[in-house]
């Protein structure tokens, strides 16, 4: 059974000696791809933090209960899909 995709990219090792044009281009593309992935991650993290703060302001003390419930359900789904 194949596990569902989580949207997380796995970084692969690139073996390039850098002595020719193709190796140079491959290394540059890998660097650009890695930077792109990091920017996407940080943008998503910032968006999540803003949403968390907005919810905390709107729901006051009830937000802790809501957040705990969401985390519990996510943990349950992850254990169901991927096991321990």
Image: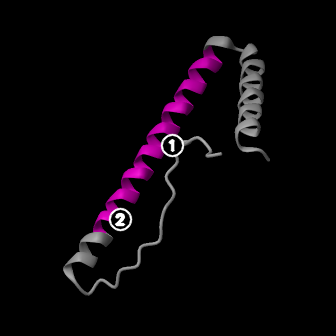
Query: Based on the displayed image, in which of its 4 quarters is residue 80 positioned?
Result: top right
Q: Residues within 10 Å of mark 1 (few under 14, many from 20)?
A: few
- In this view, the residue in front, 27 or 57, is 27
Horizontal side of residue 29 vs 1, given as left or right: left
Is the residue 9 above or below the residue 52 in the image? below
Q: Which mark is residue 30?
A: 2
Query: Based on the displayed image, in which of its 4 quarters is residue 62 positioned?
Result: top right
Instruction: List x then y, in percent, for residue 21.
Output: 20, 79
Give yes or no for residue 29 being in the magenta stretch: yes
Q: Which residue is mark 1?
A: 7
Is the residue 44 above or below the residue 64 in the image? below
Horizontal side of residue 76 vs 44, given as left or right: right
Horizontal side of residue 83 vs 43, given as left or right: right
Is the residue 69 above or below the residue 60 in the image? below
Residue depicted at x 51% and y 43%: 7
* Residue reaching furthest to the front: 1
Instruction: List x then y, in percent, for residue 26.
Output: 29, 70
Marks 1 and 2, how far apart at CA: 18 Å
Q: Which residues are magenta?
A: 28-57
- In this view, the residue in front, 5 or 52, is 5
Q: Residues within 10 Å of mark 2 (few under 14, many from 20)?
A: some
Closer to the eye: label 1 or 2:
1
Residue depicted at x 41% and y 73%: 14
Task: Kindly check if marks 1 and 2 are in contact, taking CB atoms under 8 A apart as contact.
Answer: no
């Amino acid at each position: 059974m194949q596990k569902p995709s989580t949207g997380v990219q796995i970084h692969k090792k690139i073996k390039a000696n850098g002595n020719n044009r193709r190796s140079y281009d491959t290394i540059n593309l890998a660097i650009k791809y890695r930077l792109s992935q990091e920017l996407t991650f940080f943008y998503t993290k910032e968006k999540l933090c803003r949403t968390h703060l907005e919810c905390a302001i709107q729901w006051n003390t009830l937000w802790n209960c809501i957040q705990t419930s969401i985390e519990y359900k996510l943990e349950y789904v992850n254990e169901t899909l991927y096991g321990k």
